[in-house]
Every structure is written in C-alpha cells, then in structure tokens.
Amino acid sequence: MKQFGLSKPEKLCSKIAIDALFRRADDTHATLAYPLRAVWRCNPARKAHPETPKFLISVPKRKLRHAVDRVLMRRRIREAYRLSRREILGDLHLPVDMVLVYVADTVLPYSQIERATRRCLQKISEKYSPSC
C-alpha cells in the first residue's frame, strides 16, 4: 500500500456533506492560516469509511481569475496535504470532513502553502479528542 498516496475514500465528494460544511452551523469550526482557511466538522452520520478524515480543496475564481493559476494552487495545496496528513492527523481516526479554501489574491510559493496547511491540520488535530 502506498504510504503517501491519496485514495478515493479520503476525498470529500458528498454534496450533502459539502453543503453542511459551508452552512454556518454550531458544529462547524473554522480557522485562518493565511493563505488558507480551513473549515471542518465531525460527521458521525457517515457510513462509508467512518474512520478516515475527508478533505476538499477550493480555489475560488473570484480570487484567481486564470484557470491555470487555480489548478496550480490546487495542486500545491493537495501536495502539502498529502505529505503532512500522516504526520499531523495520523492518530485521528474520526469522521472529520474538511475543506481548505485558498483566500489569497496571487499565486504563492509552495513553502507558504505547506506552512499554512500544517497550521490548519494542527488546529484540527488539537480540536478533537478521541471522540467527536
């Protein structure tokens, strides 16, 4: 098994779960680690792969007008998440749904994206105890 690969069960695809993340509810948490904003919630109703944290990356067209830039930033965020998730979220076996939203107006280097991703994941891991 690939240690650093991203599998399908780790990607957030459910429209209901995504809508629940962007809805301002009491069980939804958010943090800002520039240039990323992380929004997450515990989803105990999830049936498939309940022990795997799921993620989504959003790079708004309003922030980066060119598709090439949006794709580049999405790839950088995905790479930073892929490399640091095991280290930071390795012991987190909860049904956590999260979205990483890019909030900067320009293309930033990978080093800044990596630092912001690590800070967001650290906040998520600190927030949760062994149960939701």
Image: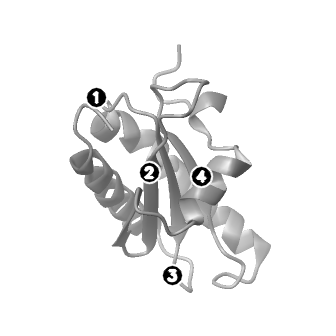
Which residue appears at 78% of the width and 72% of the height?
A: 67
- Visible in this render: residue 7? no
**Which residue lies under the disc numbered 3?**
104
How much space separates mark 2 and mark 4, taking CA atoms?
13 Å
SS at mark 1? loop
**Which residue lies under the disc numbered 4?**
56
Question: Which disc number belongs to residue 41?
Answer: 2
- Visible in this render: residue 35? yes
Q: Is residue 4 above or below residue 23?
A: above
Quarter of image, res 33: bottom left
Q: Are marks 2 and 4 in contact (CB under 8 Å)?
A: no
SS at mark 2? strand
Quarter of image, res 23: bottom right
Q: Amino acid at mark 2?
A: Arg
Q: Are marks 2 and 1 in contact (CB under 8 Å)?
A: no
**Which of label 2 and label 1 is nearer to you?**
2
The mark that comes first in sequence, 3 or 4, is 4
The mark that comes first in sequence, 2 or 3, is 2
48 vs 65, left or right, is: left
27 vs 7, left or right, is: left
**Which residue lies under the disc numbered 1?**
91
The mark that comes first in sequence, 4 or 1, is 4
Q: Amino acid at mark 3?
A: Ala
The mark that comes first in sequence, 3 or 1, is 1
Q: Nearer the viewer, residue 17 or 118?
A: 17
Local crowd at mark 2 within 10 Å, few (<14), some, or many (≥20)?
many
How much space separates mark 2 and mark 3, taking CA atoms?
23 Å
SS at mark 4? strand
Q: Amino acid at mark 1?
A: Asp
How much space separates mark 4 and mark 1, taking CA atoms?
20 Å
